[in-house]
Amino acid sequence: SQKIEQNSEALNIQEGKTATLTCNYTNYSPAYLQWYRQDPGRGPVFLLLIRENEKEKRKERLKVTFDTTLKQSLFHITASQPADSATYLCALGENTGNQFYFGTGTSLTVIP
Amino acid sequence: EPEVTQTPSHQVTQMGQEVILRCVPISNHLYFYWYRQILGQKVEFLVSFYNNEISEKSEIFDDQFSVERPDGSNFTLKIRSTKLEDSAMYFCASSLGQLVSGNTIYFGEGSWLTVV
């Protein structure tokens, strides 16, 4: 069956450190993968998109990698801040259509 | 920054009643979507809409659900006869173009539906 799995536990890190979140998938052939931030009771906010032929993408303090052999994406937040505390969602999209599939999310808490 | 707006923010309804959730997508966007998130669970795709018709729908989007773009600005989700398991946060979203082409999707703040 198809699965998208993110860090199963909530992640707590110290301010200033790099947070690394994982997204693993099985039985998908994604054309692209996205990362979102979701705050409690709010809608997801798009952060980054990486395509299957891209290995790495950066945006300010964010970095995403995509390894289609390992079927994994890593999402890094460098120099983390308490304001980065939120749930982070990965989502896979395929080559056709506009439907994409969300993972379960990882709750990140950055401790001052 | 332009945003997707949704109303109501919270609705409580009795089982079996019809509910209409409303959305105003970003004005120049062409693709519209509904997603839902049951409390504590992942965000799930319901339906996408383009050129005045449904372009994709998931297994969740059965005959109880319908969508409409009644005018040039609103996009609605109707649940015909609500069930307890329809209780969830419903997110509307829109994008300028196809997501596979790299367009960004923008989500609204959600409408929390409680069926009692």
Image (cartoon, helix red, strand yellow):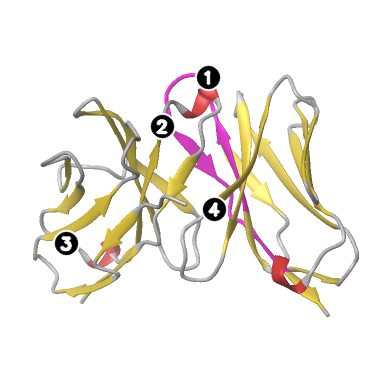
Give the residue type at disc 3.
Thr
Q: From the viewer's perspective, is residue A23 above or below residue A84?
A: above
Residue A24 visible in the snapshot: yes
Which residue position is annotated with label 2? Answer: B96
- What's drawn in magenta, residue-wise? A89-108
State the residue at coordinates (33%, 35%). Answer: B28
Same chain? Circles 4 and 1: yes
Q: Are marks 3 and 2 in contact (CB under 8 Å)?
A: no
Which residue position is annotated with label 4? Answer: A45
Give the residue type at disc 1.
Asn
Q: From the viewer's perspective, is residue A77 above or below residue B39?
A: above
Query: How far apart, in angstroms, are the residues tagged by discs 1 and 2?
Result: 18 Å
Secondary-structure class at tag 3 = loop
Of pointers 4 and 1, the one earlier in the residue sequence: 4
Q: Pointer 1 indicates a residue of which chain?
A: A
Same chain? Circles 4 and 2: no
